[in-house]
Amino acid sequence: MKTLFYVLASICILELSLCQNDTTVPITTTPEITTTTPITTTSTTTTTTTTTTTTTTSSTTTTTSTTAETTSTPGTTTPIPQGDVIFNFTVPKNSSSPCLRARFSLAFDFKYPAIINGTKLNATAYVKVNSIDEYSGECNEAFNTLEIEFNSGWSLVMNYTIQENAYELNVMRLTYKVTAEMFPDVDPKYIGSKEVQGSNLKEFAANRGNSFKCISETKIELGSEHVDFKNYQAQPFLPSDSKTGDFDTAIECTADLSGNSKLVPIIVGSALALLVILVLVAYIVGRTRQRPGYQSV
């Protein structure tokens, strides 16, 4: 009986130690951008009015939010994407031996000035790409480039560089058009073509011969705008004789790994709990069988 008690106690202690050892998972793949609004104290009460409008076009989905201009920091909105479209790319296009292979879904977060009923507002727009017009790219030993055209005049250029047999997404440039259709209630002075660029990004890094994969959302800052990637997997600098037609072994982002690692203590704990129950059942059955019966006189 004492031996069984010690076995049960050891199993419980092992279960607790496994669950406690798996509590910290660093998530450092991509910096999360947090907008902080300074607190301003005045003698009057300020009322903030929020208006949300959804506009759908054939190539993009736009969600906008406007906030009364009570502080110097623009209002923000939390987008909830629906039905992400995953695009596939090879550079050169449709090549059987590409230098770059990629697939991902794409969206953007914009901030812009708006005017509603004569009131200046700070607005945000979430634009999700549902289709592309064309894409192209360039291959050489120093860099691989993917250029995506969409929404009749918008373009996104992604430039991968390599150094010491390791590659990364280093430069990204977005060109877009601000229109009243895509940016509802936009200040007329803000309408026109815009361009933002990010350099020395150091995103999606992996060794040559591996692909980089991140199903979780990754936000990359370009000035005041953000490019949102989901379901991302890419591999630049493929060898010229590559005939696999698919990605090589993937290096997964920390966000994906941390999501999977949370299941480990749950699975281990469930298994140990089941083992404890089986031991208890076996003990009870054993005790029942060992009870002496009545002897006939």
Image (cartoon, rainbow, N blue to C red):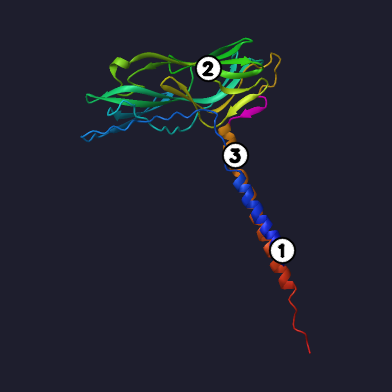
**Label 2 near label 1: C-beta < 8 Å?**
no
Mark 2, Cα crowd under 10 Å, few <14 / some 14-19 / many 20+, is few
Q: Secondary structure at mark 3?
A: helix
Query: Is residue 160 covered in magenta?
Result: no
**Label 3 near label 2: C-beta < 8 Å?**
no
Inter-mark Cα distance, 1 to 3: 35 Å
- Residue type, mark 1 in image: Leu
- Residue type, mark 2 in image: Asn
Image side of residue 141 versus residue 132, left or right = right
The quadrant the C terminus occupies is bottom right
Of badges 1 and 3, the one in the foreground is 1
Of badges 2 and 3, the one in the foreground is 2
Instruction: Indicate the position of residue 11 as horizontal and vertical percent values.
Output: 67, 55
Image side of residue 228 versus residue 54, left or right = right
Q: Which circle marks residue 260 in the picture?
A: 3
Instruction: Indicate the position of residue 65 as horizontal and vertical percent values.
Output: 34, 29
Q: Earlier in the sequence, mark 2 or mark 3?
A: 2
Q: Compared to 247, does 25 lie above or below?
A: below
Q: Secondary structure at mark 2?
A: loop
Q: Residue at x 72, y 71 (%)?
A: 287
Residue 41 falls in image quadrant: top left
Instruction: Indicate the position of residue 70 as horizontal and vertical percent values.
Output: 27, 29
Image side of residue 58 versus residue 39, left or right = right
Magenta residue span: 247-253
Q: Secondary structure at mark 1?
A: helix
Q: Disc 2 designates what residue?
A: 200
Q: Disc 1 designates what residue?
A: 4
The quadrant the N terminus occupies is bottom right
